[in-house]
Image (cartoon, rainbow, N blue to C red):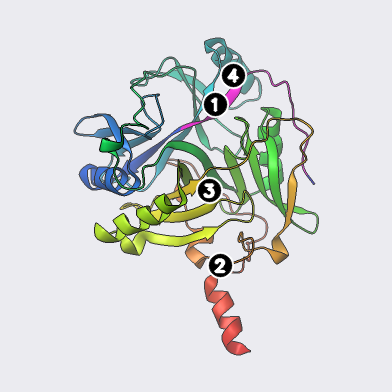
Amino acid sequence: MLPPVNLRPSFNITRSSHVRLTVADLAESRNFYVKVLGLVVSDEDERTCYLRGLAEACHHSLVLALDEEGAGQCRRIGFRVFFDEDLDVAYAWFRERGLPAEWVDVPYQGRTLHVSDPIGTPLELCAHMETRPRLHIDFEQYKGAHAQRLDHFQTFAPDTYELCAFYGELGFRNSEYLEHGDKLLGAFMYRKGTCLDLAIVENTGPALHHFAYTVSESHDIFTACDWAGILGYGDGVERGPGRHGPGGMLFTYLRDPDGHRVEVFNSHYQTIDTEIEPVRWDAASLSTNARWGLPALEKWYFEASPFAGVKQIPPAQTPNPMTLERFLLEQSAR
């Protein structure tokens, strides 16, 4: 069901690191992420805002870029590598496979490499980033949900197995997976020794379904919803609070002013040891809820932030999840 994993990859990706989004109103988006999620501004100018979680020392995990005409897109998702020389190996590795790879200058980062995976997902690799003091015990500065750190991304791909195999070659291991019959529909992959850095779900893509921040306490999840309502973003509380099946975390999903989806959740289990087997979930009996909660709205399953300038590819078969709309229709027909 799952493709093999290379446990000694050519270069060492260590974790999900940062995400770059385009927004229509920089002040409005800044307001959302600072006052609802509780992120901290590291630096900003009239066109860009760099934010990080309270427990993060690295300069940014979220970059908001003003783009009035191209708002609502994701420019890149970022991963860290361990050593600077890993970037040189990565450059050669992508070029040898006919995949894009180019060096770029990026503020507040060391040498940065732009690459793309086989379906065109734009990635950004760096080994270093400027640092700022962690603020996780500066309680007087806490706002919103007190988001601590960026944890993972979830993307759409037209073929989960093929893309899972690609990232498996880069050393990404599977903690859990979602299947139906002999079809792999979702892969939950990691590098940092928890259960997730990158989730790949079969749907029209590439596209960014969501990015996720951890919170320290379960009540912080409700706090995110409360502040969203207080500040006029209540309609953007799209799903939850609830508990996932895969991962087992408590969660809620919110849409920001440009429609980007962000999850806040309490953190998950360790997966460092090599003898741990991935957990299988059957899509026919799962709505990504473990034991309670209604299915998500249809838009949660299908809407996502497109990657700027990247053509999307539909899957061979359109997904048919149990949406809230379908669930209620079937219940009313009984």
Classed neighbour count for the residue bearing mark 3: other residues with Cα under 10 Å, few (<14), some (14–19), many (≥20): some
Q: Residue furthest left?
A: 46
Q: Residue furthest top?
A: 85
- Going from the N terminus, do you reach mark 4 or mark 2 first? 4
**Is disc 1 surrounded by few (<14), some (14 to 19) or many (20+) residues within 10 Å?**
some
The residue identified by callout 4 is 90
> CB atoms at circles 4 and 1 under 8 Å apart?
no
Q: Earlier in the sequence, mark 3 or mark 2?
A: 2
3D distance between C-alphas at marks 3 and 1 = 17 Å
Q: Amino acid at mark 3?
A: Gln
Q: Is residue 92 left or right of residue 235?
A: right
Around disc 4, counting alpha carbons within 10 Å, would you say few (fewer than 14), some (14 to 19), or many (20 or more)?
A: many
**Picture quarter containing residue 139?**
top left
**Which amino acid, by three-letter code, is at mark 4?**
Ala
Q: Residue at x 80, y 55 (%)?
A: 182
3 or 2: mark nearer the eye: 2
Residue designated by label 2: 293
